[in-house]
Image (cartoon, grey):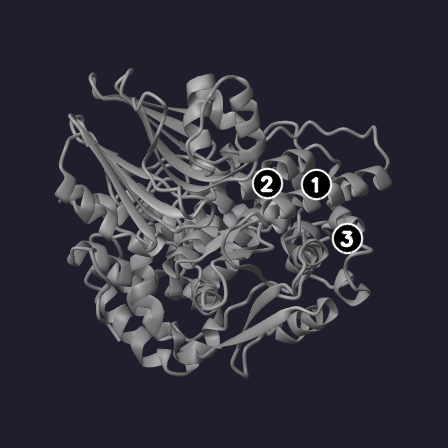
Amino acid sequence: MCGISGFNFENKPLLKKMCDLITHRGPDDVGYYTDSGISIGMKRLSIIDLHTGHQPQYNENEDIWVIFNGEIYNFMELKNQLENLGHNFYTKSDTEVIIHAYEEWGEDCVKKFRGAFAFCIYDSRKKILFLARDHMGLKPLYYYFDGEKFIFGSEIKCILCHGIKRIIDKEAFNLFISLGYVPNNLTLFKGIFKVPSSSYLIFNLKQKQLKIKPYWNINFDVNRDKSVEQLAMELRNLIEESVKLRLISDVPLGAFLSGGIDSSSIVGIMSKFMDEPVKTFSIGFEEGAPVNETKHARYVAEYYNTDHTETIVKSTSYELLPDLIWHLDDLISDAAIIPVYLMAKYAKEKMTVALTGDGADEVFAGYSVYYRNQGSNFLTHIPKTYINNIMRFYKYIPIHKLRMVLSYLNESKTLEDRYIRTILYMPDVEKPMVVPFETENVKSMIINTFVNNLDMINQFTNWDLKYQLPNLYNMKTDKMTMAASLEARIPYLDIKIVEWASKIPSDLKLSGDIEKYILRLAMKDILPRKILKRKKMGFTVPVNLWFKTGFKEVSGEILEKIEKRKNLIKSKYIKMLKRNQFKKEYRNRVWNLIMFELWYETFIENDGLKPISFF
């Protein structure tokens, strides 16, 4: 993996400064290209073609240049096809395939790629920049355009070193306190945007105009023509192919192992294809944590005879937050950033590439909210008119905990309500008491993304795949592994698997209360029965335990600072949180705002070009 950056004017020292800020994404190599009206550069983590894979790369006439972050897993197939069409290659890398694919198929080249990618092509003939991001949003890509300057980078901090004025986007802030991340194309910085997943951006260097266009969408066109046995075998073959493609590497690789069905399946298949024992890494927490999966990971490691390493997260690990938030300039508040980073950091000592089991829950309906929402729920028997009448007086109720109970009832009326409740840190009805400005209704925004004629399971899967994954989970994995200069590869999010899964009946993803049913069938002779029958436990980070130990004093100090952000948060609300910060029901709200405060001090009060010193 790598980091890329650039802009629409010539300034090599500034380009070098941008690239230096993302050295963690590519410590092995650096490359620049400047021309009249263009500067592009990259930092490289060398994985494939260690000797001739230097970037930027160019075509035969040296009038098309590319910088690339990611991997094109089907590059050998495409290279053979392009050579047969008359293209000449001077490297053995997957990067060069992008150039010739663009020459041959133009903008449609992105539809040919299987992989994780964010790249920029400079076409000196057409005087354009062509930027693209992969189907599932596995790799980040940001841009800024003020009508004159166009700047892009793998991380926002690259853009900030241009002296961009830093203003909080209040629409994005509203989304953040609701979801714990910012979806769509927004970021917390006003004027800095994401290139959306499965989209490309074309910037015309002469006219100084840009356009963004999606090139792919999920199609839930369900087909019931095949038997369950046929589908299970198809899935098994697809996963094996996906894993095999991701074993292509010129550097050591291994896997992250939790002991659940997803990661265990990946390790089982890797063991089938690799000659030496698979290097596996798992993460656990100190005694007292609510969930600890190390014993399951250890069992799987012994079953497949892997070279296994365990890392224990200590309660003092919160001290990493200032550094990790610097890496998360596009902020997410998921506390799992700490164990993911630590696992990547220690794994880096033995490998440069790690395969993960991420994505299976989103592709195959693996979250408990899917099956817990099926069937009877006593809250559904409370008349809606009764709840609606009570909610008219919500803001006048003086006791916050009682308001929370009423909000819970209000958000439990329908299946959609209950699903959305699980993904929101804060309901919309609470916002007027939290922020001093008008806010958009986030629940309505989510519902407006729902697709007509989809059953509820595919409705929820569609949201998870298009919004949660590219903006939250994939960014957590990318940025925490890249912080450790380690590449994560995610077989379940291969485009062929995602497209295949979108066409199978929902009852093969969720059968009664058996989540990921078809995946279990596909893996029945790979996995030990003990793992095959396991229910999903979830990757629960013991934030409550941390609040009771060393983080207790620190969290209060941070909340004191948040009280000063009166243009963003009402001080009365912060005072209430300070009184209740150690209660379980307030945990997510407190953690969310603590993460925001550390981000604010890093990127708004300071220049954001290095982590702050806090603890």
> Which three-letter amino acid code belongs to the residue tagged 3?
Met
Alpha-carbon neighbours of circle 1 within 10 Å: few (<14), some, or many (≥20)? some
Alpha-carbon neighbours of circle 2 within 10 Å: few (<14), some, or many (≥20)? many
State which quadrant residue 297 falls in.
bottom right
Instruction: Give the labeled residue for mark 1.
Output: 238
Q: Earlier in the sequence, mark 2 or mark 1?
A: 1
Instruction: Give the labeled residue for mark 2.
Output: 494
State which quadrant residue 481 falls in.
bottom left
Q: Nearer the viewer, residue 68 or 174?
A: 68
Q: Nearer the viewer, residue 213 or 299?
A: 299
**Residue at point 44% right, 55% down?**
476
Residue contact at pointers 2 and 1, CB within 8 angstroms: yes
Percent across and percent down for residue 104 are 46, 18
State which quadrant residue 611 falls in.
bottom left
Alpha carbons under labels 2 and 3: distance apart: 17 Å
Percent across and percent down for residue 425 are 45, 56
Instruction: Give the labeled residue for mark 3.
Output: 523
Alpha carbons under labels 3 and 1: distance apart: 12 Å
The answer to whether residue 384 is visible is no
**Residue at point 37% right, 53% down?**
177
> Which three-letter amino acid code belongs to the residue tagged 1?
Leu
Q: Earlier in the sequence, mark 3 or mark 1?
A: 1
- Regarding mark 2 in the picture, which secondary structure is present there? loop
The answer to whether residue 592 is visible is yes
